[in-house]
Structure formats: C-alpha cells, structure tokens
Image (cartoon, rainbow, N blue to C red):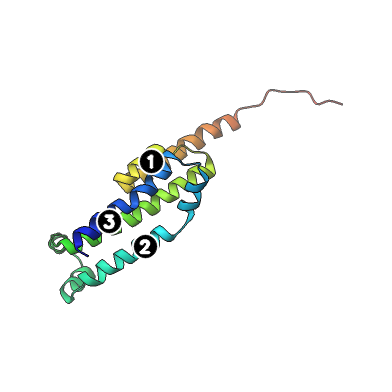
Amino acid sequence: MTLDVIFDGANVFVLPFWLLMIVLPKWGITQRIINSTVPFAILAVVYIYLFITGLSPETAESFANPTLTDLARLFSDPQITATGWVHFLVMDLFVGRWIYQEGLRTGVWTIHSLLLCLFAGPMGLLSHLATRFVVQAVAGRGADAPAESVPESP
C-alpha cells in the first residue's frame, strides 16, 4: 500500500463520521457509531504504522528536542507529513466527538462548531466553548430573574 493510498484513505475514512454528527445528530445509529472507539483505534493503528515506518535515528533525535527549523525540515518529508496529518485527523475527530456528545447532553447547538472542527479543530473547539458559554449565560439570566411575588395559600 502506497503512502498516497494511506493518506487518501484516512481522509475519506473520517468523512462519514463527520457527516453523521453534522447531518443526523439525533439518529440512534449515529449515536451508536459515534460512541464507539473503533474509528479512533483504526486511525491510531494507521498513525502508529506511519510513525514506526517513518522513524529513523535522525527523526527521533529531531523530535526529541525540536526546533522550528527541524520541524519544517521533517515535515517536508511526505512520510512525516502523512503521519502528522493522520494525527490531526484523529485528534480533530476526537474533539468533534466530544463536541457532538456534549451538545446532545446539554442541548447546545453544535453544527457550526462541528463544521469548524472538521476543518480547523481548535477553532471548532473554541466555537463550541463560546456557544456553550453564551447559552448557559442566557439560560442563567432567565433563571436568576426575580420571580413574581405570589402569596402563599393558607
């Protein structure tokens, strides 16, 4: 299997999970699939394979005490870039899964955050944290509003 096939396969592999979370979030099958750790285990195996096959004494030394210049040089190697990309795919999907599960649990709207997370994980995470904060602040304001005085019955 070539590096391009592994890279393309990993990219395609994550798309159904994102699609399910974004388009059919409350579908029971979506919830069962997304609650599974199997997709992460599969991607982790791909990552470990790429990591081990791309590891050399030189790369190990560069990663042990990295400088920006070392990392730029390392990531010019397609094997290292593919390994890093699969790392991003795993972690972004993991964060997306958390956003999805958190949204179901709290009722906070997540589509925008999941879309951002698909393309730029940390932005999606920040979007969800901000959305959750706003929703909780608005809900808190409503709960903290003074209740009308109602006389107690005797």
Residue 105 lies, in percent from the top left, at 53, 45
Query: Type of residue at label 1?
Result: Ser
For marks 1 and 2, give the CA distance. Answer: 24 Å
Residue 32 lies, in percent from the top left, at 50, 52
Q: Quadrant of residue 74?
A: bottom left
Query: Type of residue at label 2?
Result: Ile
Identity of the residue furthest to the right in this view: 154
Residue 113, numbered circle: 1
For marks 1 and 3, give the CA distance. Answer: 24 Å
How crowded is the residue under tag 3: few (<14 C-alpha within 10 Å), some, or many (20+)? few
Viewer-side label of 1, 3 = 3
SS assignment at label 2: helix
Residue 14, numbered circle: none
**Residue at numbered disc 3:** 9
Question: In which quadrant is the N terminus drawn?
Answer: bottom left
Q: Quadrant of residue 42?
A: bottom left
**Residue at numbered disc 2:** 42
The image shows residue 109, relative to residue 86, as above or below, that is above
Residue under the image location 52 percent in, 46 percent down: 28
For marks 2 and 3, give the CA distance. Answer: 12 Å
